[in-house]
Amino acid sequence: MLVLSHTHVSKKMAHRRSRLEISLDVLRALKKGIAKPTRVMYDASLSWILLQDILASLTTQGFVEAYDFTHLRDKRSSVGYRLTQKGEKVISYFRVTMRARHALYAEQGIFRSHSQIAT
């Protein structure tokens, strides 16, 4: 049986992320302290339009809050984003859930791709 790591799989063969996985990637970027939308977009590997849609959804649900960036020296960005306490809880919940899932798969000898078990 040939097993390839995620670095050897072409983009066409790569796992397509669900909306949940994309949202978690955005939340993780914000948890790292990345506040500027363009930087979040790059960190989460998203298009601008999809990022705007995800940020709007996360803001509406209370996981993320937007704040005014105009007082900072960088005048290119006027809005920054930060994780709320509710967003922190979501990340924590999914980290625990994915670790438990990974442990269960390992115990049963089931192997999943890296993206499906990432914490």
Image (spheres, helix red, strand yellow):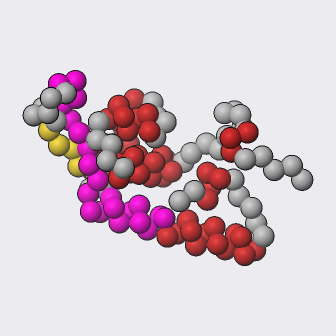
Q: 34 left or right of 106?
A: left
| Of the pair 4 and 58, the residue shown nearer to us | 4
Q: Is residue 109 magenta?
A: no
What is the number of callouts on the image?
A: 0
Q: Where is 39 relative to 87, above or below?
A: above
Q: Where is 33 relative to 88, above or below?
A: above
Residue 61 shows in the view: no
| Of the pair 73 and 22, the residue shown nearer to us | 73
Q: Residue furthest top?
A: 76
Q: 9 left or right of 87?
A: right
Indicate the quadrant where residue 81 lies: top left
Q: 42 left or right of 98?
A: left
Q: Position of residue 119 (x, y in %)?
A: 53, 59
Which residue: 35% across, 53% down?
31
Indicate the quadrant where residue 78 lies: top left
Which residue: 72% across, 39% down?
9
Q: Position of residue 109 (x, y in %)?
A: 78, 70
Q: Position of residue 12 (x, y in %)?
A: 69, 33
Q: Where is 34 relative to 73, above or below?
A: below
Which residue: 61% across, 69% down?
101
Q: Residue furthest front?
A: 73
Which residue: 71% across, 34% down?
10
Tell me the magenta residue range: 75-95
Q: Residue furthest left?
A: 71
Q: Position of residue 105 (x, y in %)?
A: 70, 69
Residue 109 shows in the view: yes
